Image: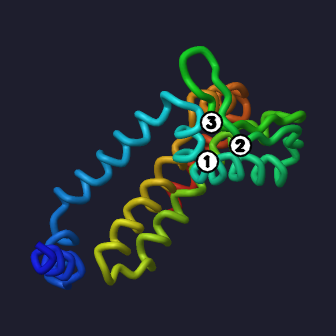
Amino acid sequence: MSEYMNNFWLFLNSEEFLNIVLHNRFYLILLVISLSFVKRHTFQGLFMSSLVNIPGTVLHETAHFLVGFILNAQPASFNLFPKKRDDAYVMGSVGFRNIKFYNAFPSAMAPLLLLPLAFWFDKYFLITTIWRYLAFVLIETLIIENAIPSSTDFKVALSSPLGLFFYGGLIFCLAIVM
C-alpha cells in the first residue's frame, strides 16, 4: 500500500499530471465551482465564514477605503469582521462622511480595481507544480470574486445621477479613444 501511495504522490507531482490539469478547462471549472460551494456553505457559521472570507474582504474593503480617501469621501469607519444581518452575514464595510456626486461612483465601484491585479497575477504567477496551480486558482478566484461590487455598492454608485452621468460619459469617451 505504501508503494502505491508513493507512486500516486509522484504522479501528482509530475510534469505529466500538471500538463493534464493545466490544459483541460474542465478541471479549472470544477475547482472554481468547488471553491464557490465551500465558500457558500461557510456562511452558515460566523467562525467559518470569517476564516474563509476575511482575506477577500480585506481586499474589497481596502479598495473602497483607498479610493474614498483619495477622492475626499472621508472614510469614517472600516470594518472587516462579519456581522449577522437578517439571515445572512455582511462581511465588511466602509462608511463615508462626505459622499458627493464626484466620489460616490468611484468609491462604490472601487473593488473593480482588483481586476487589473488579478490580470497581473494571472500573467506572472509561475505554475511549476500542481500545488502552485491549486494556490493560483485559489488566489485568483479570491481576487476576482471580491472585485465584484456588492448590491450596497451598486446602490451607492447609482445614488448620484450627476456622478453617474459624469463617469458614464468618461467611460464612454475612454472606450472610444481606445
User: What is the quadrant of residue 129 in the picture?
Assistant: bottom left
Drawn side of residue 93 relative to residue 148, left or right: right
> Residue 83 location, x and y as percent?
67, 28
Q: Is residue 112 left or right of residue 62?
A: left
Label 2 belongs to which residue?
80
In the rendered structure, which amino acid carries the disc numbered 3? Met
Q: Is residue 119 visible?
A: yes
Residue 97, above or below 52: above
Residue type at the position of mark 2: Leu
Frontmost residue, 46 versus 167? 46
- Please give the name of the residue rendered at 66% of the width and 51% of the height, measured from the top-left corner: 58
Query: Hey, which quadrant is residue 140 in on the image?
Result: bottom left
Q: Residue at x 47, y 62 (%)?
A: 139
Q: Which residue is mark 3?
A: 91
Few, some or many C-alpha atoms within 10 Å of disc 3 (few <14, some 14-19, many ≥20)? Answer: many
Q: Is residue 177 above or below residue 167?
A: below
The reply to whether callout 2 and callout 1 are in contact (CB within 8 Å) is: yes
Instruction: Say what secondary structure mark 1 lies in.
Output: helix
Q: Nearer the viewer, residue 44 or 98?
A: 44
**Tag shown at residue 36:** none
- Density class for disc 1 (Cα within 10 Å; few <14, some 14-19, many ≥20) is some
Camera-side residue: 67 or 128?
Answer: 128
User: Label 1 amino acid?
Assistant: Ile
Q: Are marks 3 and 1 in contact (CB under 8 Å)?
A: yes
Q: Which mark is residue 54?
A: 1
Sequence-wise, which precedes: disc 2 or disc 1? 1
